Amino acid sequence: MKKITRILLAVVLIGGSLFLIASVLKKNKQKSEEKTAVVAQTNATVAIRVSPVVKSAPELDVIANGNFAPSQELSFSAEKAGRVVNVLVKEGSHVSKGQVLATIRVDQLNVDLSSAEAAYQTAVTDFDRYSNAFKTGGVTQQQLDQAKLQLSNARAKLDASRINLGDASIRASINGIVNAKYIEPGSVVAAGTKLFDIVNVSTLKLMVTVNEAQVANLKTGREVNVKASVFPGTAFKGNITFIAPKADASLNFPVEITIANNPGQQLKAGMYGTAVFDFPDQAATIIVPRTAFVGSVSSGEIFIAENGTAKLKKVTAGRVFGNQVEVLDGLQEGDQVITSGQINLADGTKVSVIK
């Protein structure tokens, strides 16, 4: 009997334990289902970020960087072969247009010039003699014409010889400073040998690039403030002298600024410079983040959040200011434009705003 009693007691205890376990599992299942329902209700909306639509004046002031370049830069090469006799300048020398920089000895050209001068004098004498003889009937018109032709040919050969000999004197064709010298007296050069580099830094050029929205507000002749990184406390003035009519491969427009006030030639070609384009105050307009547009600015579509729902708006885009875009029509102040999460949206989608 005792054994049967123990068995019955064990059965009762096990059954009670199983009942308790079943009750706990049932309660846990109910709680899990409730949480799942809450999550499902939450996931029925798309999480988004918004930006309020306000009117503001666009900031159009532009800073563009570039390097200073000389207004003129030329390399001089020998036009005739020969030996360098004299080098009359050195690196750093200031030279003027027409100044002789070096001379090249060309003996053959001297011989050619002497021969051409002798031939010309002979032709002059012959023409004078034939002219006098023609007056008395001693020569025919044909003979006189032939003498005139010979004189003309002799003069042309003499001019050519003088030009060739003149090429032996290397002359500066611009005002400037000798930046590099590649020859010394006694050097033997061939035609085309590089002799000097000359740069003119009395005025400098600063080449920068601006985008299409910025270039629309620029015109040639406009004054521009220019800064140099090595002279932070000095202000330089420049004027726009060229605006490229065509954009480069990066869809930017090259702009050339000429700086005339370079006292003491402080600025050097190759230095780093900054141009500051000051634009007049602009009227307030609706400006939204570029990320508010569906796909791209050209799509002209923007979602706004209204009463927990996404609504698709057709808008007219205006000027682009970096990461901001002007909207001319389609939005009103106070609208909440959606700036992220659009990939999951359609017109009428329920949304929840992430703060």
Image: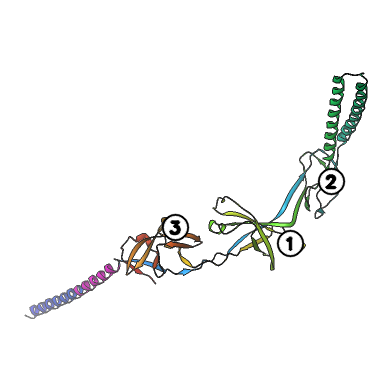
Which of discs 2 and 3 lies nearer the camera? The answer is 3
- Element under disc 2: strand
Q: Are marks 3 and 1 in contact (CB under 8 Å)?
A: no
Is residue 269 something one can see in this rendering? no
Q: Residue at x 86, y 35 (%)?
A: 109
Quadrant into which the C terminus falls: bottom left
Is residue 283 something one can see in this rendering? yes
The tag on residue 262 is 1
Between residue 100 and residue 107, name the one nearer to us: 100
Q: Are marks 2 and 3 in contact (CB under 8 Å)?
A: no
- Element under disc 1: loop
Residue 60 percent across, percent down from the top left: 55, 64
Which residue lies under the disc numbered 2?
102
- Where residue 92 sits, quadrant-wise, is bottom right
The amino acid type found where label 3 is placed reads: Val
- Real-space CA distance between mark 3 and mark 1, rounded to the nearest whole angstrom: 44 Å
The amino acid type found where label 2 is placed reads: Ala
Up the image or down, 165 lies above or below 97; here it is above
Residue 1 percent across, percent down from the top left: 6, 80
Give the magenta range: 26-42
Between residue 197 and residue 175, name the one nearer to us: 175
Up the image or down, 158 lies above or below 281; here it is above
> Residue 231 vs residue 121: left or right?
left
- Real-space CA distance between mark 2 and mark 3, rounded to the nearest whole angstrom: 62 Å
- Real-space CA distance between mark 2 and mark 1, rounded to the nearest whole angstrom: 30 Å
Up the image or down, 33 lies above or below 122; here it is below
Which residue lies under the disc numbered 3?
297
